[in-house]
Amino acid sequence: MTNELDVLIIGAGPAGLSAALRAAELGARTAIVTQHEVGGMAANDGPIPVRALAQAARLLREAQHLNRYGIAVSKPILDYPRLLARVREVVDDVVEHSTLRKQLERLGVDIYENAGVARFVDSNTVETATGLTLHANKIILSAGGTSRQLPIPGFEYTSTHSDAWALTSIPPSMIVVGAGATGVQVASIFQAFGSQVHLFQAGPRILPTEDEDVSTAVATAFRDSGMIVHESFGAIDSFDKTPAGVRMNFSKDGAPDSVDASLVIIAVGWVADTAGLNLHAAGIETNSRGYVQVDEFLQTSAPSIFAAGDITGRLMLVPQATHDGFVAASNAVRDRSMSLWDQTSPIGSFTEPEYAQVGLTETKARLTHDVIVTRVSFDETARTIIDGRTIGFCKLIVDRSTGTILGCHVVGERAVEIVQVVAIAIAAGMRVDSLAKVPLSFPTYAGILGRAAYRAAQQIYPEFQSAR
């Protein structure tokens, strides 16, 4: 089967769906082909199912506080098969209503699902494992990423984060290797579900890309929950199969050690999913990290092919992938009419406690700025006290000379939502005194920002300073 198209998109995750919508809106004859189902990793084994599982973990934790508010209930029991059914409902509902599918169909986009791996025949032609052949003037490659593999003996006995989300029962124990965003989510959720979790991080602190105060606070909270957190643990030597699961053998400074668990999850990175694409047939080059090389227009080394999302190795998050798809499609249809623009990118994770950030960490800010740092604890604001969610803090980083907000870091309840407000303020170019003057509703979680901004403004602007 051969179809003549203006634009073909490979991959139906956030980047691919955004690209298909944009190309179709610009009047291009468009098709999208995907190895599995529409939605990609984000909908099927990424943020959507993870957030649904995190909600269950949250409800279990909240139930422990009911007695403090005079509500007597028996101890909650997790029915994991029922939870999985709910997760499947959520995923199906999102795919049906929130993945742009209906809009694409109304615009006449051809959608080819479960087509298997696509491979380039040349720079304008693609064949799929199911025998489909598609030809297009322009192609947008948004095939996403896959978990990084480790060259360690016994690695075949380990699992990925995707395997964790697909479990049909809660393992009694779990080892999670890698304490970046993905690893800590796996660890936090299954610790709440009743697994005994060992979290391993080769570096000196978990969440190494976060502000140091965030790493410290989250590690402390994890340990308080009963999780065993191993930082600077050394190096993994091998994995062995055991009657009850898997043994991880590791060593530090020549001293051997090991830990046994029912399951080992490896979350040490995300690489471009290029296996089987036959990139060389299309003249597509990759960079030194193995990601597809693109320019500021998201054009690859093949003039007729653009790339968007995780496969390019840029900031690998849903909002950024959606933005990439829009830019790539605009340039595919309108011949390099739009370059990438700087983005204010809030980042967060639905762990317990939540953490989130936008802008610079304190360490990075101090390299180039004279900074003011204010920190408001969650145990000194009304809403957090009302809700009994007093663990955490909000940290605001401001340039002393200009009042510019450089960064914000939050640990605690609604951290991800709080940081969105600061992201808007930064994107709008608000100075900290302007943020301090906004009468945020009371009592709210976002209100903590007003207090942090006021404390910073007091150190810069006379109108905020007391008469003493």
Image: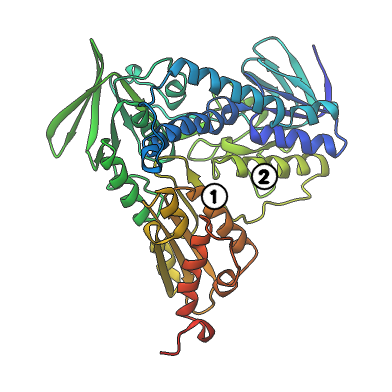
Q: Assign a secondary structure to mark 1.
A: helix
Quarter location, residue 260: top left
Quarter location, residue 292: top right
| Amino acid type at mark 1 | Glu
The circle drawn on residue 98 is none
Q: Which residue is drawn at 85% across and 26% down?
A: 108
Crowd tier of the residue under label 1, counting other residues whose Cα lies within 10 Å: few below 14, some 14–19, many 20 or above: some
**Horizontal and vertical percent for residue 353?**
39, 44
Q: Which residue is drawn at 71% across and 29% down?
A: 97
Position of 234 relative to 465 (above/below): above
**Horizontal and vertical percent for residue 283?**
65, 31
Q: Is 203 situated left or right of 46 in this image?
A: left
| Amino acid type at mark 2 | His
**Horizontal and vertical percent for residue 450?**
52, 66
Query: CA separation, marks 2 and 1?
Result: 20 Å
Q: In which quarter of the image is the N terminus?
A: top right
Mark with earlier residue (2, 1): 2
How many numbered marks, from 0 up?
2
Q: Residue at x 65, y 34 (%)?
A: 14
Pick out the residue farthest to the left: 255
Crowd tier of the residue under label 2, counting other residues whose Cα lies within 10 Å: few below 14, some 14–19, many 20 or above: some
Q: Quadrant of the C terminus?
A: bottom left
Pick out the residue farthest to the right: 27
Q: Is 417 situated left or right of 395 in this image?
A: right
Q: Which residue is drawn at 22% across and 39% down?
A: 233
Q: Assign a secondary structure to mark 2.
A: helix
Q: How is the image coloured?
A: rainbow
Give the residue pinned by disc 1.
417
Give the residue pinned by disc 2.
323
Pick out the residue farthest to the bottom: 467
Q: Is 350 situated left or right of 243 in this image?
A: right
**Horizontal and vertical percent for residue 419?**
53, 54
